[in-house]
Image (cartoon, rainbow, N blue to C red):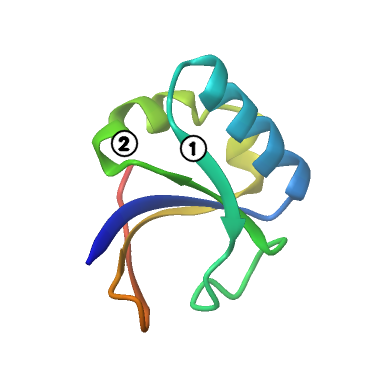
Amino acid sequence: MEVYGIVAFRSRQAVLRFQEEMNREGLSSTVIHTPSQISLGCGLSVRFRLNDLFDVTRLLVAPYTQSLIGIYAASDDGRSIKLIPLEW
């Protein structure tokens, strides 16, 4: 089972900017299709290592918070993805 974090935004522009900022900070991240359980948004999200959660939340300041849907822990068993909303 694979476990990772997801940051979901309403705007593709916010997704791309946030992923770029994570890369500048040396944090591993990937742009992914937003899981279907997250019904709002632009269809793209940023995937990150859960070990980096503190640093990810540190970067979530304006203007990102205006477009933020939420941060989730995802567990993927290859057949389905289970999401748990994270407090930050």
Q: Please tell me which residue lies in front, 46 or 14.
A: 46
Q: Secondary structure at mark 2?
A: helix
Q: Which mark is residue 72?
A: none
Q: Is residue 22 left or right of residue 1?
A: right
Q: Is residue 21 left or right of residue 57?
A: right
Q: Please tell me which residue lies in front, 31 or 54.
A: 31
Q: Position of residue 21 (x, y in %)?
A: 59, 23
Q: Secondary structure at mark 1?
A: strand
The quarter holding residue 20 reads top right
Q: Tell me which numbered mark, 2 or 1, is placed earlier along the sequence.
A: 1
Q: Position of residue 68 (x, y in %)?
A: 58, 48
Q: Which mark is residue 53?
A: 2
The quarter holding residue 54 reads top left
Q: Taking 72 as reference, is 62 above or below it?
A: above
Which residue is tagged 1?
29
The quarter holding residue 62 reads top right
Q: Please tell me which residue lies in front, 51 or 86.
A: 51
The residue carrying pointer 2 sits among few (fewer than 14), some (14 to 19) or many (20 or more) residues within 10 Å by Cα, namely: some
